[in-house]
């Protein structure tokens, strides 16, 4: 889900750029996200890729999970003249800044409150649910893989993230703090705890 909404966000940017004839899209993905999420090893998405049609997301064919009208909302590069297909760049891939520097800048520009600049707090509303499902299905959060790499490369601090993931494991098992948010997300999706394998303890 988290990966798919990222792809849809980029496809929306591609479509708007084509409609408005905007030549350049800048995306704030980290080097790790570009390499592992998009399978690219460059700060720019190849023009040949940008001129193709989206056929699937997260390994699922769009036609299997969306109506024809919904499929049309994704990116179809072949429908546009080459001159209207924007370049897609990832500046943070090239700059490869440390996480703490990015947080400080975002806070100093008053784009986010200094107390609420955690990606876990500011990201998609389904992130808490995804984290809890991960703990119940995998025993850990799948986000740990990305952040552990950042820590090993000196791009993030272990002292910042270890407590976050340890708290996530505890709250995922007990429901402390996170249960109301999880229950609301499940309700919005017309799902129950047992549908996603969650069993909160007491």
Image (cartoon, helix red, strand yellow):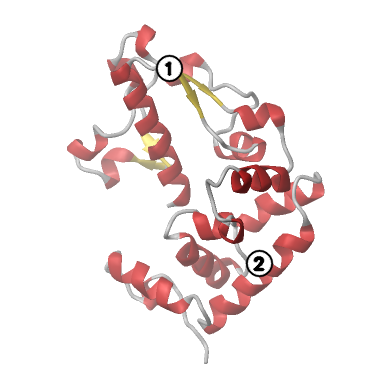
Task: Please give the residue where the numbered disc 2 appears in the rendered image.
Answer: 165
Give the residue displayed 76% in from the left and 45% down from the top. 155
Residue at 66 percent of width and 35 percent of height: 31
Q: Which mark is residue 57?
A: none
Q: Earlier in the sequence, mark 2 or mark 1?
A: 1
Query: In the rendered image of this protein, does residue 88 appear above or below residue 101?
Result: above
The tally of labels here is: 2
Q: Is residue 61 left or right of residue 124?
A: left
Check disc 1: other Cα within 10 Å, few if <14, some if 14-19, many if 20+: many
Tell me, yes or no, whether the two marked residues, 2 and 1, touch with CB atoms within 8 Å.
no
Crowd rating for badge 2 (residues with CA inside 10 Å; few <14, some 14–19, many 20+): some
| Residue 13 horizontal/vertical position (percent) | 38, 30
Quadrant position of residue 179: bottom left
Visible in this render: residue 93?
yes
Quarter where residue 106 is shown: top right
- 134 versus 104 height, above or below: below
- Measure the C-alpha gap from mark 2 to mark 1: 38 Å
Which residue corresponds to mark 1? 86
Q: Nearer the viewer, residue 132 or 105?
A: 105
Instruction: Mark yes or no: residue 58 visible.
Output: no
């Amino acid at each position: 889900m988290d990966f798919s909404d990222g792809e849809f966000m980029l496809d929306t940017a591609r479509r708007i750029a084509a409609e408005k004839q905007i030549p350049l899209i800048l995306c704030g993905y980290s080097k790790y996200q570009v390499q592992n999420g998009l399978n690219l090893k460059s700060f720019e998405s190849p023009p040949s890729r940008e001129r193709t049609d989206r056929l699937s997301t997260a390994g699922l064919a769009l036609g299997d999970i969306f109506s024809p009208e919904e499929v049309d909302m994704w990116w179809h590069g072949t429908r546009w003249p080459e001159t209207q297909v924007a370049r897609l760049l990832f500046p943070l891939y090239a700059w490869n800044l440390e996480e703490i520097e990015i947080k400080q800048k975002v806070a100093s520009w008053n784009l986010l409150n200094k107390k609420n600049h955690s990606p876990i707090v500011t990201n998609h509303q389904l992130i808490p649910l995804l984290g809890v499902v991960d703990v119940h299905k995998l025993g850990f959060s799948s986000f740990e893989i990305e952040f552990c790499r950042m820590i090993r490369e000196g791009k993030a601090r272990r002292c910042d993230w270890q407590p976050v993931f340890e708290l996530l494991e505890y709250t995922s098992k007990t429901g402390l703090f996170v249960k109301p948010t999880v229950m609301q997300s499940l309700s919005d999706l017309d799902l129950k705890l047992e549908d996603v394998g969650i069993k909160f303890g007491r």
